Amino acid sequence: MNREYHKWFSNVLQRDMELLVFGHGGRAVLFFPTRMARFYDYENWGVVGALFEKLENGELQLFCVDSIDAESFYNKTIEPRARIERHLQYEEYILGEVLPFMHQHNSGRPIEVAGCSMGAYHAVNLALRHAEKFVKVVGMSGRYDLTVQMENYNDLFDGYRDEDIYFNMPQEFMANLSDENILNRIKQLDMIIAVGEADPFLHSNQELSRKLLAHDIQHEFYIWDGNGHRPRYWRQMVQLYL
């Protein structure tokens, strides 16, 4: 199986960024890491290995990007406004640097986006905000409103709210989205959401699904037995959904 390591200095982030590419062709999938995880963790957890046949056969090409969540959402040393600003820089890096890199490596094929846990948030948020850039999105064990306090998961903005935060919380902005052009683009997405019945984010997934359906946005929503917030479940999910 083809495996490539890439690293470059991102002008927008003003730091080196790394990623791994698995496979040599096929459907191009942008794969976001879990909370505070790294670009190599899916490989270490066997999630990439679970896709070996598709990757080896040229059905799928996986682009595992790095995260800067420790510098944005989870950075308690900076003000909440600075946290969302850093996240928006990360989005600019993905759109302006990673997507062109993917097109170059994959002959300009349409791009799919996926992730587990916090990676599911990144995938779904990015796809809903920029639906014209993607053809499919898969969110596994995601949390779709980072401002909601639940169990051991805090409001990542400590009660602070502004427009940028609102428009980066899918569970919130989808409720009031009325622009028909944007809604029509979202309706073109092949969307899959999966979560465990004992996952702490089950309610978040149910709420997002309900709000999508309120706009007649068709999607697949799967609830797995138990707490699916584990690599052993993600290894099974990627085989079914990617």
Image (cartoon, grey):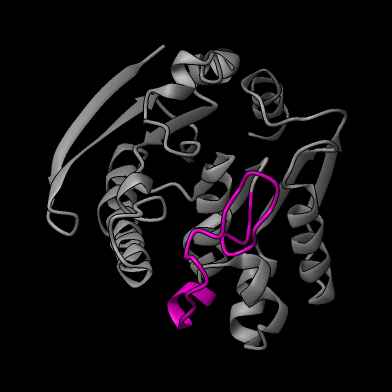
- Residue 240 is situated, as x and y percent measured from the top left of the image, at 73, 29
Residue 231 seen: yes
Q: Residue at x 55, y 26 (%)?
A: 59
In the image, 86: left or right of 150?
A: left
Say which quarter of the image contains residue 231: top right
The spot of residue 75 in percent (x, y) is 34, 52
Q: Is residue 233 above or below residue 69?
A: above
Q: Which residues are magenta?
A: 143-167
Q: How many marks?
A: 0
Quadrant of image for the N terminus? top left
State whether residue 90 is above or below residue 183.
above
Residue 148 vs 142, above or below: the answer is below
Relative to 36, say whether 167 is above or below: below
Residue 23 in view here = no
Residue 104: x %, y % from top left:
28, 44
* Residue 24 highlighted magenta (yes or no): no
Q: Quadrant of residue 233?
A: top right
Task: Give the quarter of the figure containing the C terminus.
Answer: top right
**Residue name at image x 28 percent, y 55 percent:** 77
Q: Quadrant of residue 87?
A: bottom left
- In this image, 44 relative to 20: left or right? right
Main SS of the magenta segment?
A: loop
**Residue 153 among magenta residues:** yes
Residue occupying the point 66% across, 25% down: 230
Say left or right for 223 vs 16.
Answer: right
Viewer-proximal residue, 194 or 28? 194
